[in-house]
Amino acid sequence: MKKKILPILLMFVLWGPRMICAEDAMRGVVILPTASDVVSQESSGLSGLSDGEKKGLYYCRREGVFLDLTNDKEYVTIIFRNQAPVYFRKTELTQDLVRKIFEMREDGVYEISCIAAFSRDDWQKVYDQYNHVTDKLLEIKKCQP
């Protein structure tokens, strides 16, 4: 029995991440990041991250259907269908990222790369400045439907 299950599990582990696509996000399927996602993020220009930040990228990455955006004095919150919202401190965003956030369109599929607050290398500096540490937004990409 074990000999039959192991090849099936191995095939799922190797091919499972490749079968996940934006179409799943449109159907409301929650997409969890995999180690291969982190590698592809690094190769797309997000290199230079420490090991801790790479783990934080794994935990913070989102891909899904964009629903809404809330914009208050200090924070911008991005709301996805069937996923937890993500929020970022405005003072930590570059002008390019602010532009990309406000160009997001409802029902568009987007991928957000960010480092989870608990994995940021600069968390102490940020905490000393704001008394609170948020996720750090690195990139926003529009995915093909």
Image (cartoon, rainbow, N blue to C red):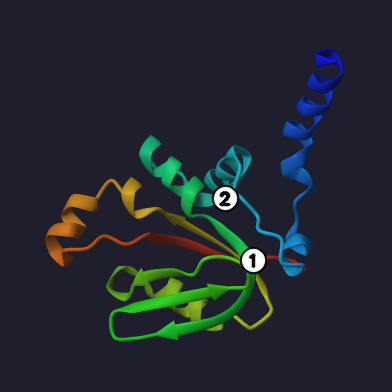
| The label number, if any, that marks residue 64 in the structure image | 1
Mark 2 to mark 1 CA distance (whole Å): 19 Å
- The residue type indicated by label 2 comes to Ser
Q: Is residue 89 left or right of residue 77?
A: left
The secondary element bearing badge 1 is classed as strand
User: Residue farthest to the left?
Assistant: 128
Q: In this figure, which residue is indicated by the disc labeled 2?
A: 44
Total numbered badges shown on the rendered structure: 2
Q: Is residue 103 left or right of residue 28?
A: left
Residue appearing at x 40%, y 70% in the figure: 87
Please determine whether, in this image, residue 55 is positioned above or below residue 9: below
Please determine whether, in this image, residue 145 is positioned above or below residue 47: below
Of badges 2 and 1, the one in the foreground is 1
- The residue type indicated by label 1 comes to Gly
Image quadrant where one finds the C terminus: bottom right
Image quadrant where one finds the N terminus: top right
Residue appearing at x 50%, y 46% in the figure: 58
| The label number, if any, that marks residue 51 in the structure image | none
Q: Nearer the viewer, residue 135 or 122?
A: 135
Please provide percent x and percent y for residue 61.
52, 55
Residue appearing at x 37%, y 59% in the figure: 136
The secondary element bearing badge 2 is classed as helix
Please provide percent x and percent y for residue 65.
66, 72
Q: Nearer the viewer, residue 57 or 3?
A: 3
Please provide percent x and percent y for residue 112.
54, 62
Image quarter for residue 135?
A: bottom left
Please provide percent x and percent y for residue 17.
72, 43
